[in-house]
Image (cartoon, rainbow, N blue to C red):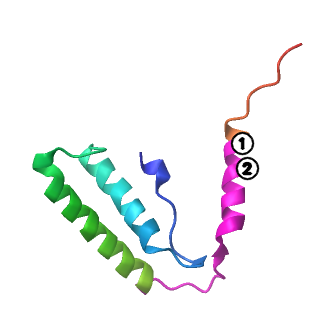
């Protein structure tokens, strides 16, 4: 579940609200063990997602670095390459 949480700091363009919310949702899902909470737990679940997202926004806004911002497209291409190597199928013995 948490493999979908991506690094959000020091990217150009900066992380969007949707990316921050999605990462927060994945985090709360992992902590709670629920992909979709029951009706009885929905309010607590939604509140936790909102609070984690707000904390993530504050964290990202206050972090500092001297490193150049990373390019999202380049990082995505690197991730695809790592995935392709990791999940490469062995050649058919012919």
Which residue is pictured at 67% across the width and 63% down the height? 75
For the point 67% across and 35% down, the residue is 87
Residue 81, which numbered label?
2
18 vs 53, nearest the viewer: 18
Q: Secondary structure at mark 1?
A: helix
Q: Residues within 10 Å of mark 2 (few under 14, many from 20)?
A: few
State which region is magenta. Answer: 62-83
Q: Position of residue 45 (x, y in %)?
A: 21, 56
The image quadrant of residue 58 is bottom left
The residue shown at (41%, 86%) is: 62
Which quadrant holds residue 53? bottom left
| Inter-mark Cα distance, 1 to 2 | 5 Å
CA neighbours of label 1 inside 10 A, class few (<14), some (14 to 19), many (20+): few
Q: Are marks 1 and 2 in contact (CB under 8 Å)?
A: yes
Q: Is residue 7 left or right of residue 55?
A: right
Q: Which residue is the site of mark 1?
A: 84
Q: Secondary structure at mark 2?
A: helix
Q: Position of residue 91 (x, y in %)?
A: 82, 24
Q: Which residue is at the front of the view, 32 or 22? A: 22
User: Residue sitting at 67 percent across and 45 percent down?
Assistant: 83
Q: Is residue 61 left or right of residue 78?
A: left
- Residue 9 in the figure: left or right of residue 62: right
Q: Is residue 45 above or below residue 94?
A: below
């Amino acid at each position: 579940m948490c493999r979908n949480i991506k690094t959000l700091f020091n990217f150009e363009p900066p992380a969007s609200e949707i990316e921050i919310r999605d990462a927060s949702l994945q985090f709360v899902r992992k902590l709670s063990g629920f992909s979709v909470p029951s009706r009885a737990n929905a309010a607590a679940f939604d509140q936790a997602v909102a609070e984690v997202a707000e904390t993530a926004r504050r964290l990202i806004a206050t972090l500092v670095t001297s490193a150049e911002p990373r390019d999202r497209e380049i990082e995505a291409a690197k991730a695809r390459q790592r995935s392709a190597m990791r999940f490469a199928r062995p050649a058919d013995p012919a």
